[in-house]
Image (cartoon, rainbow, N blue to C red):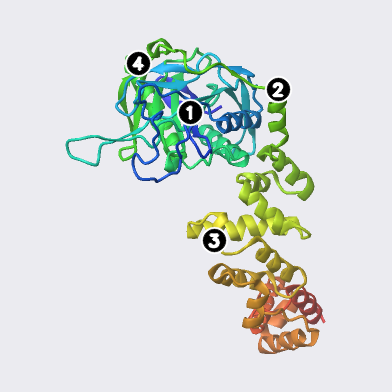
């Protein structure tokens, strides 16, 4: 267990996360308006979204299906009976004066997520619930020096609020939770997880306590929009609370904001309780009744999820736990690897994908979907190594050109004349020339200076421009030096 050292001893952080994940659907939760990101302000707003009098909400079945799909992916209880409520509060960008949400009877109940931690251990975090709700609009304060503009494009967009149990104890665990949740959502195709576009946002609940004590008073940090900021906000807020308590103060339950420039949390308002929102069932919407067979049919369409895929990669491909975890973190990465590995040495395929390819993509700031080197072409490069057409060292040079140009490995090898030398007589000739030029070192080697072997290998590879087959060089050189 990881603790923070304070002036009065050790403290434990208690963390719970509320993630708002935008449902992938072509229309909003209760209207037919589009949900495209980046559209012109107020261009995707129906009379329902703008709360015109007399307009009635109509449930979008696709959003319900996506919520059920997500619940199944989280190994959660699917509630066949659920209720939409009105959550009453007043903001300029909330035209109705209330948000249609779910409270006492959500669509999805308890579930779990298994975290893969950097030290190789796993930890299970409980999911309290997943409920559906509509998003509010957006207030724009930077468009005019004296006015606030309102964009209602997001008003009515379907959100899944996924609430965790307070099971996390470090910022690293919170980061691992968000990465795993985002991975599951992307595998399921229910949310794209793009935090920079606002389609996945996080409210962070943080409290501190002495190890073994009851939970302390929590503060909620609203709308944090990156995993890095979530982790930084937890670290800052925990230390802030410890300082307040150790100086004799008390923590007030409140909502705070994360300042992304100063890396501090700031007080926003006292934390509302459920009764402050005056929840009651929405009179315009009947309770939602799901058919068990319909839920089962959705379950049958679930893809292989990260945990199952990881177990299969370890079992079928004999990959390490770490390598398998890296490869299944995103569905596109796993699919890419499987294409490369098909019919080839899976460990060699894994090394090239996680090492060379991921390194180049990271440096270029590209996602695997945008890789200039296709999975088929990387497989072709590995084939050239396997049949001794090129050496591993030359392969790295070829890969560099592949990444730059998108060309196939075989074409680059032919064009640049990079075929590996496997002609015994040519290798012997190069070795003889090196030994003649370094007769003094040959004598030293034969006198017991075995470490010079690496020097001779290097000289032969240099003489052959790296094209000589390394295994043949080693064998022939060993025989000649000891002869």
Real-space Cα separation, disc 1 to disc 2, in angstroms: 23 Å
Real-space Cα separation, disc 4 to disc 2, in angstroms: 44 Å
Q: Nearer the viewer, mark 3 or mark 1?
A: 1
Q: State the SS at label 1.
A: loop
- Residue 450 lies, with reference to residue 341, above or below; the image says below
Real-space Cα separation, disc 3 to disc 2, in angstroms: 47 Å
Residue in view at x 33 percent, y 41 percent: 41
Tell me which label, 4 or 1, sits earlier in the chain.
1
Tell me which label, 4 or 2, sits earlier in the chain.
4
Q: Can you tell which mark lies on residue 77?
A: none
Contact, CB < 8 Å: mark 3 with mark 1?
A: no
Residue in view at x 62 percent, y 82 percent: 416
Residue in view at x 55 percent, y 33 percent: 177
Say which residue label 3 marks. Answer: 360
> How many residues crowd around disc 3 within 10 Å: few (fewer than 14), some, or many (20 or more)?
some
Say which residue label 4 marks. Answer: 252
> How many residues crowd around disc 4 within 10 Å: few (fewer than 14), some, or many (20 or more)?
few
| Residue 414 horizontal/vertical position (percent) | 67, 81
For the C terminus, the quadrant is bottom right
Q: Can I make out residue 285 in this image?
A: yes
């Amino acid at each position: 267990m990881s603790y923070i050292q304070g002036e009065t001893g050790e403290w434990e952080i208690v963390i719970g996360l509320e993630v708002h994940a935008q449902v992938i659907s072509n229309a909003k939760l209760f209207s037919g308006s589009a949900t495209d990101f980046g559209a012109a302000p107020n261009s995707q707003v129906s009379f329902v979204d703008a709360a015109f009098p007399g307009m009635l909400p109509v449930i979008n079945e696709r959003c319900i299906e996506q919520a059920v799909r997500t619940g199944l992916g989280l190994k959660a209880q699917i509630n066949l009976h659920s209720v939409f409520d009105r959550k009453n509060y007043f903001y300029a960008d909330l035209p109705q004066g209330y948000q249609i949400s779910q409270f006492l009877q959500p669509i999805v109940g308890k579930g779990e997520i298994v975290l893969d931690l950097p030290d190789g251990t796993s930890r299970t975090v409980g999911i309290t619930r997943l409920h559906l709700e509509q998003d509010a609009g957006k207030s724009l304060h930077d468009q005019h020096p004296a006015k606030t503009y309102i964009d209602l494009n997001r008003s009515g967009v379907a959100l899944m609020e996924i609430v965790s149990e307070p099971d996390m104890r470090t910022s690293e665990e919170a980061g691992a939770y968000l990465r795993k949740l985002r991975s599951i959502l992307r595998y399921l195709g229910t949310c794209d997880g793009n935090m920079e576009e606002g389609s996945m946002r996080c409210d962070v609940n943080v409290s501190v306590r002495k190890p073994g004590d009851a939970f302390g008073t929590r503060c909620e940090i609203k709308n944090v929009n990156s995993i890095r900021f979530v982790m930084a906000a937890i670290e800052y807020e925990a230390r802030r609370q410890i300082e307040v308590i150790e100086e004799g103060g008390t923590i007030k339950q409140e909502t705070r904001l994360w300042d992304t420039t100063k890396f501090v949390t700031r007080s926003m308002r006292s934390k509302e309780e459920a009764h402050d929102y005056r929840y009651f069932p929405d009179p315009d919407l009947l309770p939602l009744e799901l058919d068990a067979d319909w839920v089962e049919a959705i379950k049958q369409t679930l893809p292989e999820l990260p945990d199952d895929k990881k177990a299969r990669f370890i079992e079928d491909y004999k990959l390490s736990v770490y390598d398998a975890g890296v490869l299944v973190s995103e569905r596109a990465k796993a699919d890419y690897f499987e294409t490369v590995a098909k019919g080839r040495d899976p460990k060699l395929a894994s090394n090239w994908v996680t090492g060379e390819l991921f390194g180049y993509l990271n440096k270029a700031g590209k996602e695997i979907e945008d890789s200039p080197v296709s999975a088929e072409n990387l497989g072709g490069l590995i084939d050239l190594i396997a049949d001794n057409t090129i050496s591993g060292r030359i392969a790295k040079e070829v890969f560099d050109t592949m990444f730059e140009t998108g060309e196939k490995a075989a074409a680059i090898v032919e064009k640049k004349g990079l075929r590996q030398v496997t002609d015994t007589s040519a290798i012997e000739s190069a070795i003889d020339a090196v030994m003649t030029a370094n007769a003094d070192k040959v004598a030293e080697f034969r006198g017991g200076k075995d470490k010079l072997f690496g020097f001779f290998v290097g000289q032969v590879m240099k003489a052959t421009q790296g094209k000589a087959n390394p295994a043949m060089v080693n064998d022939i050189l060993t025989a000649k030096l000891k002869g």
